[in-house]
């Protein structure tokens, strides 16, 4: 079956009352137009409604992507920042709605940035700007943003991202540690919840899989070094008079 036909079936399923995650016509058209198979090597995986692993990253299920965008409520002309570019699919959906020149995406893993750029170009969205950086800092060079999508869980949205919203902007993020909720935050800090979700935690610089060293390792090394200073060295041990043993 042609990818376009499979894509139609995918979106029809997301609109059906059994799932009902695609509600707006704008999102329906966008997801019908974006060739998802350009972002995943296997067509069967691309159009199945399940989360998959690819290139050591988690690729969101189409229904999860739909929930994110219904909460984000992107409109044509909005300036959008996607934090956690991954394979680039969500950035492509945003570009389909608002235009490529209005979409910016960042990822902390350099390899994913390269993959996302390639995938977006192959799918016809080469105008999307993808950069490698710590997403907790946002993308201040292009702020303010009308919409910010954070594709990783955080106990509280990073202050830098909230500060980079336009006065009428909207940030959508999975908020919480064990129990997470999809939350939309307005420029005035007004919050709206969209039900439970389960996302991987937001990584900061040094925690990405392709980092030279991880922050946790550095911390552990410090702790071991501190513990080592408290250990007795040879000259510190009690003297043993073997002649009396």
Image (cartoon, rainbow, N blue to C red):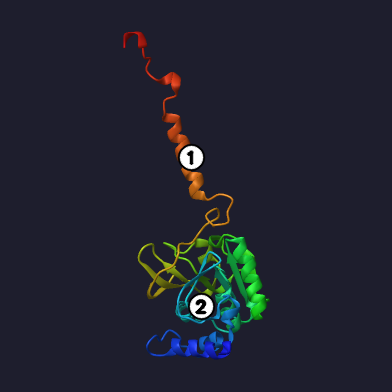
Residue furthest out toward the left: 245
Image disc number at residue 45: 2
Q: How crowded is mark 1: few (under 14 residues within 10 Å), some or many (20 or more)?
A: few
> Which of disc 1 and disc 2 is earlier in sequence?
2
Q: Which of 235 and 204 is in front in this view?
A: 235
Q: Where in the figure is residue 11, as x and y percent of width and height? A: 49, 87
What residue lies at 52% left-to-right and 90% top-to-bottom?
8
CA distance separating discs 2 and 1: 43 Å
- Outermost top residue: 243
Residue at the (44%, 19%) spot, across then down: 235
Q: Name the residue under label 1.
A: 222
The quadrant the N terminus occupies is: bottom right
Left or right of residue 144, residue 176 in this image: left
Q: How crowded is mark 2: few (under 14 residues within 10 Å), some or many (20 or more)?
A: some
Please give left or right for residue 75 compared with residue 230 in the image. Answer: right
Q: Which residue is drawn at 44% across and 21% down?
A: 234
Could you say which is closer to the camera, residue 132 or residue 191?
A: 132
* Label 2 with label 1: CB-CB less than 8 Å: no
Q: In which quarter of the image is residue 229?
A: top left
Return the x and y of residue 113 as percentages of the image width and height. 62, 66
Give the numbered dot on residue 112. none
When asked about the image quadrant of residue 201, the answer is bottom left
Q: In this view, does 178 lie above or below 206?
A: below
Residue drawn 51% across the image and 82% down it: 47
């Amino acid at each position: 079956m042609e990818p376009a036909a499979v894509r139609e079936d995918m979106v029809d399923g997301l609109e059906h009352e059994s799932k009902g995650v695609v509600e707006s016509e704008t999102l329906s058209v966008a997801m019908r137009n974006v060739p998802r198979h350009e972002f995943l090597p296997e067509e069967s995986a691309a159009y199945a409604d399940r989360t998959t692993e690819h290139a050591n990253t988690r690729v969101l299920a189409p229904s999860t992507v739909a929930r994110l965008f219904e909460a984000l409520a992107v409109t044509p002309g909005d300036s959008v920042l996607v934090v956690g570019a991954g394979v680039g699919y969500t950035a492509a959906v945003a570009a389909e709605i608002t235009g490529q020149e209005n979409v910016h995406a960042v990822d902390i893993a350099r390899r994913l940035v390269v993959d996302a750029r390639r995938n977006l170009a192959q799918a016809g969205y080469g105008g999307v700007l993808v950069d490698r950086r710590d997403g907790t800092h946002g993308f201040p060079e292009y702020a303010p943003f009308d919409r910010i999508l954070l594709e990783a869980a955080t106990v509280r949205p990073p202050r830098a991202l909230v500060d980079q919203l336009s006065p009428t902007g909207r940030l959508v993020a999975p908020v919480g540690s064990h129990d997470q909720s999809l939350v939309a935050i307005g420029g005035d800090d007004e919050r709206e919840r969209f039900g439970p979700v389960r996302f991987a935690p937001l990584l900061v610089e040094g925690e990405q899989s392709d980092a030279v060293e991880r922050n946790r390792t550095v911390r552990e090394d410090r702790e071991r070094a501190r513990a080592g200073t408290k250990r007795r060295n040879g000259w510190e041990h009690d003297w043993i008079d073997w002649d009396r043993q």
